[in-house]
Amino acid sequence: MVSGKFLGKDYRKFLEYNVGEATITILEYKGKGYYMVQEPKLESDAQETYNILIDYLYKSLKPLYTEKDPIGYIEGVLEEVAEELGVKEKYEKYYDILHYYILRDLIGYGKIDVPMKDPRVEELAVEGPGIPVAIVHRDVSEYPWLDTNIYFNSEEELRAYVQKLALRSGKHISTAYPILETRLPEGHRAALTLSKEVSGRGSSFVIRKFPEQPLTITHLLTLNTLSPLEAAYLWLIVEAQGLIFIIGAMASGKTTLLQSLTTLIPPDSRVITVEDTPELRLPHEHWDPLYTRRSYNPAEKWMSIDLHTLVKFAWRRRAEYIIVGEVRGEEVQVLVQASASGHGGLTTLHADTVDSMMVRLMSPPLNVKHSFLTLIWCIAVMKRLRDIRTHRIIRRLTSIYELEVEGNRIKPIEIFSWNPQLDKHLPENPYDVYEKSFRLKTLAKRYGISDEEVIVELQTRKEFLEKLVKEDIFDYDNVALRLFEFYSIKRHGDVFERDKS
Ligand SMILES: Nc1ncnc2c1ncn2[C@@H]1O[C@H](COP(=O)(O)OP(=O)(O)OP(=O)(O)O)[C@@H](O)[C@H]1O
Ligand SMILES: [Mg+2]
């Protein structure tokens, strides 16, 4: 049984699987979804030994981050410590369970270690003590959040945990400045609060997990987030160094789409990425990642290095592509200008629609001049939706727009759109795409190639991506390898021979 709470009650089990030695059961009870964790049981005798050992280890262990192999180190000292503390016999008797809990609590994430290790968990949140830790599950999206059977029992416990998370990310959180946005060593994004200073229900945290394997373009095609023809269109624009904006609401999948498009950049390019929190990873040899540095201490404000400074700096560092993880301020002007001077550019922006994006771009603090908007080659709109048939959460690239100038007005032209009834991205024919797209026509002119040749390029890339899906090429390294191969085969007859001077 999963939890005493549901014993004998009417619940519906969705899914059961193991994460290491723990068992996860996902169930529905009274219309609510639950993620129940069952870990190996620590009997009272073993619990006592655990308490003795962990107490000593907390106090005496040297900082584990100085160790190359912390697990090996702990395993190495445990026996000695058990002997020293006079619990060797019990230690040997409960060897497996003690190792499980000691490693979970010293090296892992303690109480939330199982969901942190579960690759199907996307996000974790807790609003205060006594409130269940909630998670977002990749495969059970009928419920936006699933409650777990994991609780922080008191404010003291949660507060100590939040401080530990801060420390683990190399930062500090205190009542003097009780909020912290940070990144855990594995790349997970964490937003923490301490005590009730600013968060009504006590210390709290939200962790957006960094996927061990990023979703690749082939994953997104299989999920029908976008169509192979849309991917082919975006690929041509990426290769021609156009400026692409990906817009959408919170957690709509903007960064994931951006990540998948970066693998389409020609392999020999120098690519600079600029981010607040490192989320992107590129397979390019000449990838130059830049990250902002924040200082919360007003006296050390001068030490902060913001996105605007870094994007200006990136421009001077000579690269074919500048990618900004997310634009929020005047750095967008630099990106747009960099695009005008021939750099390829990709970025994401929080906005629901193209119209609200244009308003946001032209208002403070972004302040992009109206005439500069035409430098944006295309806008991809991401949406997180509930599938009317299955009630599951799906993510779709619902439209791709180009911006056309009509007199004094800038008019968004919808090149692709998603049909929710059919769950299809239209058009499905490269001729129709070419017909609508003024960017592709400009591209043909720029490279002195015929309309037909651009259409053939669209079709070739569409088929190439479909072939990757058919061959089950999903893994990040393999996808990158196959795309790089595509370029090396094509090199001799490159239609978009780029000016590399
Ligand atoms: N197309 C997709 N299909 C399924 N899951 C996805 C898809 N895109 C993203 N996800 C998952 O959704 C979560 C949010 O994705 P992502 O970080 O890309 O969103 P975002 O729009 O950039 O969010 P934010 O607004 O917070 O920056 C991640 O856990 C990611 O793995
Ligand atoms: Mg994002």
Image (cartoon, rainbow, N blue to C red):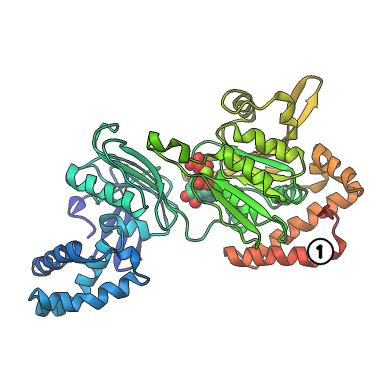
461 to 32, vertically: above or below: below
279 to 391, vertically: above or below: below
225 to 491, vertically: above or below: above
At 69% from the left edge and 53% from the top edge, which residue is drawn?
Answer: 228
Closer to the camera in the image, 188 or 175: 175
Query: How dense is the environment of label 1, judged by Cα within 10 Å: few (below 14), some, or many (20 and up)?
Result: few
| Quarter of the picture holding the N terminus | bottom left
Could you tell whether 312 is left or right of 427 in the image?
left
Closer to the camera in the image, 354 or 293: 293
Q: Percent from the top left, x then y, of residue 58?
A: 19, 62
At 33% from the left edge and 54% from the top edge, which residue is drawn?
Answer: 168
Mark 1 element type: helix
Rendered image quadrant of residue 301? top left
Rendered image quadrant of residue 356? top right
At 29% from the left edge and 65% from the top edge, which residue is drawn?
Answer: 22
Closer to the camera in the image, 96 or 15: 96
Q: Amino acid at mark 1?
A: Lys
* Residue position for label 1: 490
Q: Percent from the top left, x then y, of residue 201?
A: 24, 34
At 7% from the left edge and 76% from the top edge, which residue is drawn?
Answer: 86
